[in-house]
Image (tube, coloured by chain):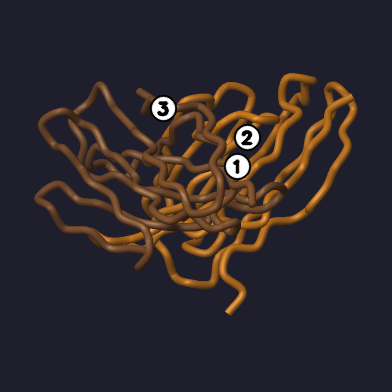
Amino acid sequence: NAGVTQTPKFRILKIGQSMTLQCTQDMNHNYMYWYRQDPGMGLKLIYYSVGAGITDKGEVPNGYNVSRSTTEDFPLRLELAAPSQTSVYFCASRDRGRYTEAFFGQGTRLTVV
Amino acid sequence: QQPVQSPQAVILREGEDAVINCSSSKALYSVHWYRQKHGEAPVFLMILLKGGEQKGHEKISASFNEKKQQSSLYLTASQLSYSGTYFCGTENGAQKLVFGQGTRLTINP
């Protein structure tokens, strides 16, 4: 069981470039999340989704877009990369229900230069 | 909206106890606790629900005061493997899971 898979693991972008961070889970979880973690800081929620076709903004959505066309995939799009988006990005998923913990991917380390 | 954790950092000797606190300004449905080792992804420890139910790690305990919107994580007889950054996550019933800024725990031999 692969769990939550993020690609790529590392990426260097130039200012103004665009890219998509991929996130796939094979646990049939309804809820999926994108977080960013700046060095030495906590996890900030960017976007989340409670099911295919449904997405909502988190705490820091500016500069990002998401889509959820399938249960398995939840890609995060950066349209015009800025140095402030240098961070580690984590995708997570949870099952429906009362006791459901979040499973995290291994993260994507993004540097914008 | 983010929960607030305290303290920000703790340094212990092996075998000592620690308490990490988490508070929110909003009414909570559940509180999650996760631990992150350096360079790794966060890993689930516990979840506490409104009403007193909880699920999680056998050797770690936690409490949830619904009226005060506060939770505490209790680490007793700490081991070297407990080192890492601890995050509380809170949910207000809409599946929106937000995390605090973290508490860095260092255990020395």
Q: Position of residue B101 (x, y in %)?
A: 50, 29
Q: Which chain is orange?
A: A
* Residue topped by disc 3: B6
Work out whether residue A94 or residue B82 is closer to the camera in this orientation and state it.
B82
- In the picture provided, is A111 more to the left or to the right than B74? right
Amino acid type indicated by mark 2: Gln
Residue at image position (61%, 57%) is A105
Q: Which chain is brown?
A: B
State the mark number for residue B76: none
Q: Is residue A46 in sight in this rendering?
A: no
* Residue topped by disc 1: B106
Disc 3 vs disc 2: Cβ atoms closer than 8 Å? no
The Cα–Cα distance between marks 2 and 1, rounded to whole angstroms, is 20 Å
Find the residue positioned furthest to the bottom. Answer: A1
Dot 2: chain letter:
A
Disc 2 crowd, CA 10 A, few/some/many (<14, 14-19, 20+): some
The Cα–Cα distance between marks 3 and 2, rounded to whole angstroms, is 19 Å
Amino acid type indicated by mark 1: Thr
Q: Secondary structure at mark 1?
A: strand
Q: Position of residue B8 (x, y in %)?
A: 50, 27
Nearer-N-terminus badge (3/1): 3
* Residue topped by disc 2: A37
Q: Position of residue A5 (x, y in %)?
A: 65, 63
- In the picture provided, is A55 more to the left or to the right than A34? left
Work out whether residue B73 or residue A28 is closer to the camera in this orientation and state it.
B73
Say if B30 sits above or below B55 in the image: above
